[in-house]
Structures are given as C-alpha cells and as structure tokens.
Amino acid sequence: MICLDTNYLILGLSEGSKEAEDLIEWSSAGERLVTPMAAWFEFLCGPVSSDQISTMRAFLHEILIFDEPQAREAARLFNAVKRKRSLRIDAMIAGAASINGARLATNNRVDFESFVSAGLELV
C-alpha cells in the first residue's frame, strides 16, 4: 500500500510529471493507493476543478478517515520530533500512513524524514 501526500495528489494531475508517471506505474502494478483525510482536505482546498477531483479520486482505493488510532499515532510521531509546530499536519499524514502499514509518497522529504526514525517508511 502506498499513501499519497498532498503534493502527490496535486502534481499527479500534471501530465508527464514524475508524480503522474508514478501513479500510473503503481496503479498498473496493482498497488493499493490511499491518502489520509488531512491530505485530501489540503488537495480539495485547491484550486482544483471537479474533473481534477474525479480524476484523482479514481486513482485512490480509499481516503483514510482520521480516527482515534491515527490520532494516537500522529501524536506519537509529533512528540517524537520534539513537537515542532510546523509538522502538525505532516504528523497526521505520517500517522495515517504508519498506522495503516503504508509507505508514504511525498516530495516533502525534508519534513517527513523527521518521522523515519520513529517508524515512517517513505517510498
């Protein structure tokens, strides 16, 4: 399973981009593509058209609901990186990937690498 960060949702709509090529490759290989509710919210804030929303939604097997286990994992990760305020939403996204056993696809590796030592796996 691969969990998509917001930037993969946005850039995946750009024909010929690395992200679009990755999405096509992963989907063709039968990978289960998911995204956390926090990333989906950021994506929907756009600007995106209804056609772009439909296109991206078609790639996704599931939008992961932010539930109590994800909240606990996000808090654990947030505390593991010394409660850096700028990483709060990233901790929610990382927590969703981690608790669901998914690798995270992101272009924001600098921030998310902070969570790797706490168990997050990046693509």
Image (cartoon, rainbow, N blue to C red):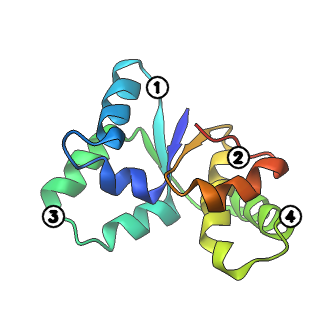
What type is the residue that disc 2 sits on?
A: Ser
User: Could you say which is closer to the camera, residue 64 or residue 20?
Assistant: 20
The residue tagged 4 is 80
**Label 3: few (<14), some (14–19) or many (≥20) C-alpha neighbours in 10 Å:** few
Mark found first going from the N terminus, 2 or 1? 1
Could you tell me how far apart the alpha carbons at marks 4 and 1 are, in whole angstroms? Answer: 29 Å
Could you tell me how far apart the alpha carbons at marks 2 and 1 are, in whole angstroms? Answer: 17 Å
- Quadrant, the C terminus: top right
What type is the residue that disc 4 sits on?
A: Ala
Q: Does any portion of residue 93 appear in the rendered image?
A: yes
Could you tell me how far apart the alpha carbons at marks 4 and 2 are, in whole angstroms? Answer: 14 Å
Q: Residue furthest front?
A: 110
**Label 4: few (<14), some (14–19) or many (≥20) C-alpha neighbours in 10 Å:** some
Q: Are marks 4 and 3 in contact (CB under 8 Å)?
A: no
Question: Please, what secondary structure does the residue beneath circle 3 have?
Answer: loop
Does 71 sit above or below residue 85? above
Could you tell me how far apart the alpha carbons at marks 4 and 3 are, in whole angstroms? Answer: 37 Å
Residue 4's spot in the image, x, y percent?
48, 47
User: Could you say which is closer to the camera, residue 116 or residue 96?
Assistant: 116
Among the 4 quarters of the image, the one containing residue 10? bottom left
Mark found first going from the N terminus, 4 or 1? 1
Left or right for 29, reference 103: left
The residue tagged 3 is 49
The residue tagged 2 is 98
The residue tagged 1 is 31
